[in-house]
Amino acid sequence: MAATITVIAEEGYGRASFARIAKRAGLSSTRLISYHFAGKDELITAAANDVMSTIGTFMAEQMRDRHAAPARLHAYIEGIVGFIDSHRTQMKALMAILLGGGLNYDADTDRKVISPVEQILRDGQAAGEFGEFDPVIMAAVVQRAVDGLPFLLDSEPDLDCAHYARELVALFDAGTTRTLP
């Protein structure tokens, strides 16, 4: 899987072929790949699922023992940014797969991605930890702020991601504690 992810990250989704992946993995033939995967689409889906599973495991650890909504929101932002920073190749590959149409990312998928953040925000409002705002809009903005980081890193590879996370936390602290006029 690592060779697939590296080829996609370095050469792009469209150029990822069994031959390039086999070469990167040090395999003498593509047969070992085609034995496990019926085609490129299946292999690409497996690579994307591998990255997303790794994100899920990482984030579960980051969110553990965080009970107050502000702490959960901080952990979410810091965790995702930290993951992106420490897994740049995987994230570049995942973004290439998504942009290349290698996965079906539709409105339902987007809703599933945003819903954990929305739930944190709703919980915080219900507990009086957050002010009044539209949690759907705020969740979408939080998610887009972290989703955009891999693209920013393409143009700013030396970006201090810890600083980026601190800035987002401060921004969303200000945005979630305010009350709408």
Image (cartoon, rainbow, N blue to C red):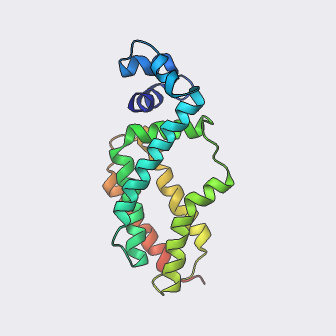
> Residue 170 occupies which quadrant of the picture?
bottom left
Residue 177 horizontal/vertical position (percent) = 47, 80
Q: Nearer the viewer, residue 42 or 10?
A: 42
Q: Is residue 155 in sight in this rendering?
A: no
> Residue 180 occupies which quadrant of the picture?
bottom right
Residue 46 horizontal/vertical position (percent) = 51, 37
Q: Nearer the viewer, residue 66 or 33?
A: 33
* Name of the residue lying farthest toward the top: 28
The residue that appears at 43% across and 54% down in the rendered structure is 56
Q: Quadrant of the N terminus?
A: top left
On screen, residue 77 versus residue 111, left or right, reads: left
* Name of the residue lying farthest toward the right: 107
Residue 61 horizontal/vertical position (percent) = 34, 61
Residue 175 horizontal/vertical position (percent) = 49, 73
> Residue 134 occupies which quadrant of the picture?
bottom right
Query: Is residue 60 positioned above or below 149 on the image?
Result: below
The residue that appears at 39% across and 79% down in the rendered structure is 68
Query: Is residue 77 positioned above or below 7 on the image?
Result: below
